[in-house]
Amino acid sequence: MLNRLTIQQLQTFREVMRTGSISEASRVLGRTQPAVSAVVANLERQLGFALFLREHGRLTACPEAHYLLEEAEDILERIARTTRSMAEFSTRQRGSLRIACFPAASGFFMPSMLADFLKDRPKVKADLMMRSSQVVSDLVASQEYDIGLAETPSPRTSIRSQSWDLECVLALPAENPFPQDRALTPQDLHDFPMATLFDDHLTNQATVAAFARAGARLNRRFVLRTFLPAIQLVAHGMCASLVDRITAKSCPTGGIVFRSFTPRITSGIAILEPAHRPQPLLAQAFRAELAQCLDALEHWHPAC
């Protein structure tokens, strides 16, 4: 019964075929001539026939040896290719990312993050899905997506998450009547046109409550589904808006200034990961960079 051939046997045989001699093959392989001769002899014994004719100190390859060389070249190239691929996985240079992202971060923030992460990784592919925060949570819970970025969801056993409670900032037209030496308050914005999110959104509810406690009138001129349109409306001098930091930092639109607002109103953001499967190394690396970026956002403050 033919024993299994080894990689060492195939490598040694290939060098003997390439160089045409045991001595040259031993030099290339960095092994002794007796060791190379022994490998070839053992290979012939396993196969049950000679691969070389030995006459007057010279080797002549038999027809079967040429066939085996083709097979050996193919096998060894596949092994080398696999080794290279695994090395690229280990250095996060190969693979794919499946990312689900809520709308506020999908227009500028996440594409910018991806561009920075992938600029030196030409063999990495990315699938970026934009959906509502609830759908993002569902996609990650299905275990099909590597990373989700969404408004902080309710706890689920199918998801691992890390949350940030990011303070909202006030977007104002560059030309505005407000004091520049302090954080602005609901009293400052009494009856000033505002763009807010829809009634059930937590940031809108917190804003309504803050104005009510201060006895100030909240003039909701624009009611939106996401903060992104608010940036354009503010830039055109139509209103002010309390926006999340991802929107504020990732939309460099002229004609806008950002100011602090008191009382503190926050927007909960979370990185979501599937809980029931291990994360690829590439996804782990991207998640770490995403977390660093959110940490930096947490400590960013607009000048008053």
Image: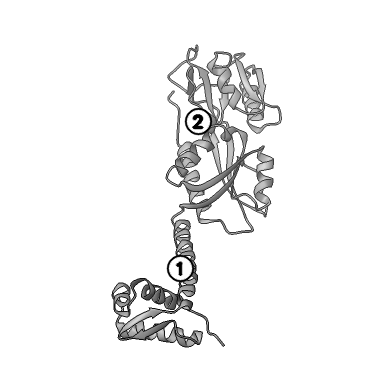
Q: Quadrant of the N terminus?
A: bottom right
Name which residue lies at 57% across and 25% down. Answer: 242
Q: Quadrant of residue 158?
A: bottom right
Judge the density around disc 1: few (<14), some (14-19), many (≥20) Cα neighbours within 10 Å.
some
Q: Quadrant of the C terminus?
A: top left
In the displayed image of the protein, which residue is found farthest to the right? 200
Q: Secondary structure at mark 1?
A: helix
Q: How many marks?
A: 2
Please provide percent x and percent y for residue 210: 62, 26
Q: Which mark is residue 73?
A: 1
Judge the density around disc 2: few (<14), some (14-19), many (≥20) Cα neighbours within 10 Å.
some
Q: Which one is in front, 249 or 108?
A: 108
The image shows residue 49, relative to residue 248, as above or below, that is below
Circle 1/circle 2 CB separation < 8 Å = no
Please provide percent x and percent y for residue 231: 56, 22
Amino acid carrying label 1: it is Glu
Q: Which mark is residue 250?
A: 2
Name which residue lies at 43% across and 55% down. Answer: 91
Horizontal side of 214 relative to 116 (left or right) equals right
The image shows residue 262, relative to residue 88, as above or below, that is above
**Dot in front, 1 or 2:** 1
